[in-house]
Image (cartoon, rainbow, N blue to C red):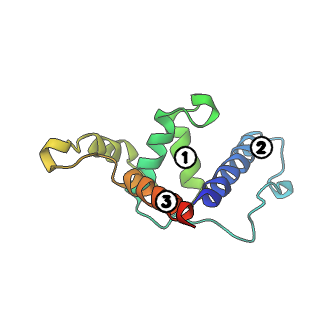
Amino acid sequence: MIAFLNHLIRHIEVEIECTKFRNDEKVNQDNLNLNVYKDTPLSWTASKRALLELIYALYLTMSINHGKISLKELVGFFSHTFHIPLPGYHTALKKMTDRTPQKIQLLSRSFFLNEVVIKFNSKLELLDEN
């Protein structure tokens, strides 16, 4: 899990640099060779809602660019990186905030992040046993 997160962080850093260059019209797109993961393309295989939950968590914790990035830019970045369209993300985020734990008898509204934490902690516990 840690290796995946490190891989994801490195990929995000590379994609941010690529995005900066793409926005500069002086740079020829054919000369961009910053994507070190060309041989192993990443694809998001969980649900779109799970991706939006992760994006929103990163946005709220100001984990990207020290929080100096808009939610729209962050959604666009992940959408581009994983080649997954995320239209109407505001509506999906609104639905997440409407997940009132009392209404649906949940401990938390963050389904995907809870799953990530549980699996991450389980793996760490397993490693501790060895």
The disc label shown at residue 21, or none? 2
Q: Name the residue under label 1.
A: 76
Question: Which amino acid, mark 3?
Answer: Glu
For this orientation, the residue located farthest to the right is: 31
Give the quadrant of the C terminus.
Answer: bottom right
Q: Is mark 1 on a helix, strand or loop?
A: helix
Q: Which mark is residue 125?
A: 3
Q: Residue at x 50, y 36 (%)?
A: 59
Task: Give the amino acid at mark 1.
Answer: Gly
Label of residue 37 in the image: none
Q: Is mark 3 on a helix, strand or loop?
A: helix
Counting from the top left corner in percent of width and height, residue 42 is at 62, 65
Q: Nearer the viewer, mark 3 or mark 1?
A: 3
Graded by Cα atoms within 10 Å as few (under 14), some (14 to 19) or many (20 or more), the crowding at tag 2 reads: some
Label 1 with label 2: CB-CB less than 8 Å: no
Residue at the image position 39 percent from the left and 46 percent from the top:
89
Local SS, label 2: helix
Sequence-first tag of 1 and 2: 2
